[in-house]
Amino acid sequence: MAIAVYPGTFDPITNGHIDIINRALAVFGKLIIGIYDQPGKQLLFSLEERMDMAGKAVADLPNVCVKSFSGLTVDFVREVKGAVMIRGLRVSSDFEREFEMALMNKKLAPDIELICLMANSEYQFLSSSLIKEVAKLGGCLEGMVPDHVATALKEKFSVRIPGGSKREG
């Protein structure tokens, strides 16, 4: 069976990502979560932290492994002998961005297919950016991220309140 690769920054991994992972496993025998090491955006977590959180999130899935990569995603997919790239779509803006990337990737690597999975309705609003904002403001993350990710976010965001004391986020 073909190897699928689910690339991303996963800063942090969310329950929406995990849903896509589980659904991709229903189709493919092996899934590699590719964590991009140096994206052109501000990251909250280091590569090691993102790899650790993703690894813990999929620890009970024997056909999933987590690897880091740099450079072109299509080169990473080829390196791990992947045949398919998996992407999750939540909203129409995701489609536009993924479509643009798919055309470029097809030009660079016509042998690698792309399969987009639509997010389940319960996760369509989730994004790592929104999760970080909720955590920073001390909001509840229940049902949005695995417990170990919520703990890591709370550790990153100790909210200072007037008077110099700290409140856990």
Image (spheres, rainbow, N blue to C red):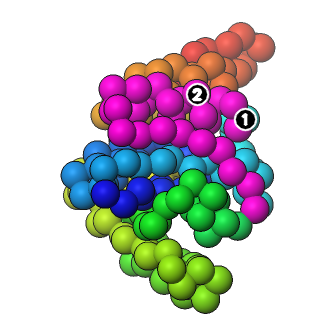
x, y (%) of residue 109? 59, 80
Residue plotted at (50% across, 30% down): 55
Q: Check disc 2 and report the residue beneath it.
A: 52
- The segment highlighted magenta reads 47-71
> Amino acid type of disc 2?
Asp
Q: How far separated are the C-alphas under marks 2 and 1?
A: 10 Å
* Observer able to see residue 90: no
Quarter holding residue 51? top right
Q: Is residue 1 magenta?
A: no
x, y (%) of residue 86? 42, 63
Left or right: 80, with 58 as reference point? right
Q: Secondary structure at mark 1?
A: loop
Q: Is residue 94 above or below residue 121?
A: below
Residue plotted at (41% across, 40% down): 64
Left or right: 147, with 41 as reference point? left
* Most foreground residue, 73 or 100: 73
Q: Check disc 1 and report the residue beneath it.
A: 46
